[in-house]
Amino acid sequence: MQNADQHESDLEKFRQAHDNLRGDLVADAIEKLEELTCKSPSRSAYWHELGNAYGKAGRHEDSLNAYAQAARTRTCRSQALHELAKSFIKAGDQNSAKHALNHLDQLRPDLVEDIKPLVD
């Protein structure tokens, strides 16, 4: 279990990574987020943001893996499934995209509408 100071330090690192990603400092964001996911693998927000960073860096397979990990943690599952489906579509994996969309449709049908037309 983390102490309060370590938790605050990790939150600050996450904020920095988020800001770096928005400011196109993608490599630095990835470095921070990879460290955070190693330290706290059950934090879906870390995995989700790492998926965003990998996607922005063009590392689509790594992005898929990070979004899948975020979905497995279940705390922000619907958003992670949405990003996972979009990543599968970008990767050309229609079957996996359909699978992710089927799960997402059970949780949040409203999130499926924007990407469902992109799947055969």
Image (tube, grey):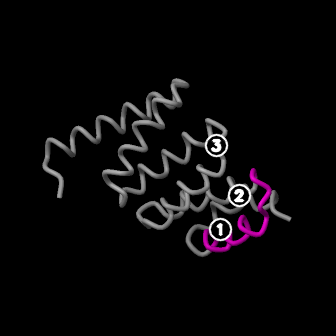
Residue 110 in picture, x, y percent from top left: 63, 63
Disc 1 vs disc 2: Cβ atoms closer than 8 Å?
yes
Would you place residue 45 above or below residue 98 in this image? above
| Residue neighbourhood size for the residue with mark 3, other residues' Cα within 10 Å, grouped as few (<14), some (14–19), many (≥20) | few
Residue 32 in picture, x, y percent from top left: 39, 37
Circle 1 or circle 2, nearest the eye: 2
Distance between the Cα atoms at labels 3 and 2? 12 Å
Q: Amino acid at mark 3?
A: Arg
Would you place residue 86 above or below residue 103 in this image? above
- Which of the marked residues, 1 or 3, is nearer the chain's N terminus? 3
- Membership of 47 in magenta stretch: no
Furthest toward the right, the residue is: 120
Question: Which residues lie in the magenta part?
Answer: 90-105
Disc 3 vs disc 2: Cβ atoms closer than 8 Å?
no
Identify residue for label 3. 59
Residue 55 in picture, x, y percent from top left: 62, 42
Q: Secondary structure at mark 3?
A: loop
Q: Quadrant of residue 106?
A: bottom right
Magenta: predominant secondary structure element? helix
Residue 88 in picture, x, y percent from top left: 71, 58
Circle 3 or circle 2, nearest the eye: 3
* Mark linked to residue 100: 1
- Membership of 96 in magenta stretch: yes
Identify residue for label 2. 88
Residue, x 37% and y 43% (percent of image)?
Answer: 35
